[in-house]
Amino acid sequence: MELLVSFFIFICALVLIIGMFIIYQGNEKVCFLVQDRTTFKLEQLTADKAVFSCLIPFTNRTGQDGTVMDAFPRHLLPQEQFDEVEVKSTLTLADNPREDGYWEALILLGNTSSLAILTVTLTAKNGNISTTIQRMVDMPIEIYYQVVGRTNWHINKDRIVMSYQEIMAALDKGVNVQRQEAI
Amino acid sequence: MAVGKIELVPIKTRILTDKDDIVEIIESYGRDIVGKNDIVSVAESVVAITQGRIVRPEELQPCFLAKVLSRFVPQKGSLASYYGMQAAMDAEGKWRVFFAMVVGMLAKLVGISGVFYRLAGKQAALIDDVTGTMPPFDKHIVYGPQDPDGVAEQIKARLGCYGAAVADVNDLKRAAILGTSTGLDPQQLSRILIDNPFGNASQMTPIVVIKNYAMAERAVQG
């Protein structure tokens, strides 16, 4: 009986120690710092198309590594609100940019940060972006990212708003830069 | 062996998938390069991919034991996630991995390392967690190849070369030969491939031909 009680106490102590170890070890905490993003800037302007981009930092706030398996933007511009442009949005790593919209899975080491480039392309359905964009509206963009660390994989979502004012400011600034470069 | 007489020739291929047959691919890309004195070596992860030995973490249901044991693997290891550990358990058996972990921990307490991987089975050591390979397999867990010796024999028979090998090589000066055709010395091949001629992204140059191996071997022997 004494042996049985000792064994039971040993098992309980073992479970407690393992539980405490797991709690102490913790898990990754990867997040996109959408509030710290840069303002959009104009990357390209053609007759029918305007391309904007901004940088979004993302970080891992704990000492446990996290794997960002996938990340992508989801722009929200319903036709009921504005039906004059086609929107394409992509997300890629700033230090290893791709043009195919594919997010290559990466390990974000504990307590480190990196940068992603969000690119938004607005194409006017009538072929004239300069006039069409004047009627553009605020457009929310959600950033989805799938992360796996020491627990089950999970998908997080953060949201930014690409406002009309920001689009206009980026357009004005970009056009001025283009003019100066042309001169 | 006089390694200086040997030449390593990486062969670039398209991205290979589970729709491909590795022996046919090697014949297709290497037919004009491989001679009868040469050894064909092929990257193990690519062999595994062509054998369909890949799984997405989303397709796995980690058991309680996998969740607990993965916590005791250093975070750089492929079994440090629920899914990597579950993949190892699926390949080698849940209780074998558990037993290996317990014995491995006890061995570590007395200063002996590597016991877990010796006891848990080959697949536990060969599994690559996500990010371990190039797109489109960067989001997959890749198991080790099945029957690497058999694959090597098939390559040798098809290409008519001196021999063939399936190798696991990385940039950290680690070259493990997982399988060879009959008569080859894995340690010798390991020394030849130690500088990772497959390159960092081995999926783009998954085949390396060791030119003139037989001639160099004969020169050493006689």
Image: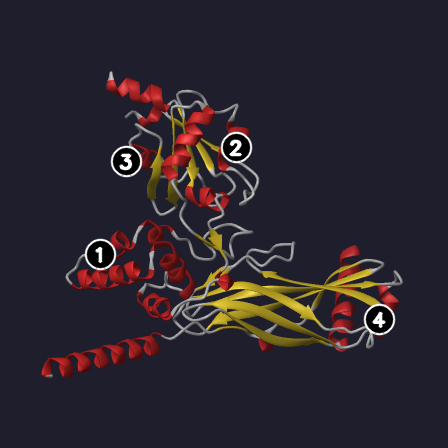
Pointers 1 and 2 in contact (CB under 8 A)? no
A180 or B112: nearer the viewer: B112
B68 or A123: nearer the viewer: B68
Pointers 1 and 4 in contact (CB under 8 A)? no
Q: Secondary structure at mark 2?
A: helix
Judge whether residue B52 can be spotted in this image.
Answer: yes
Pointers 2 and 3 in contact (CB under 8 A)? no
Label 4: chain letter? A
Q: Are discs 4 and 3 located on one and the same chain?
A: no
For residue A89, side relative to residue B192 (left or right): right
Residue B95 placement (x, y as % from top left): 29, 62
Q: Are discs 1 and 3 located on one and the same chain?
A: yes
Check residue B24 in the rendering and tell me which mark sits there, or answer none: 2
**Category of crowding for the residue at label 3, using alpha-carbon neighbours closer than 10 angstroms: few (below 14), some (14–19), many (at least 20):** few
Pointers 4 and 3 in contact (CB under 8 A)? no
**Category of crowding for the residue at label 1, using alpha-carbon neighbours closer than 10 angstroms: few (below 14), some (14–19), many (at least 20):** some
Name the residue carrying label 3. B187
Q: Secondary structure at mark 3?
A: helix
Q: Amino acid at mark 4?
A: Asp
Name the residue carrying label 4. A83
Residue A139 placement (x, y as % from top left): 74, 75
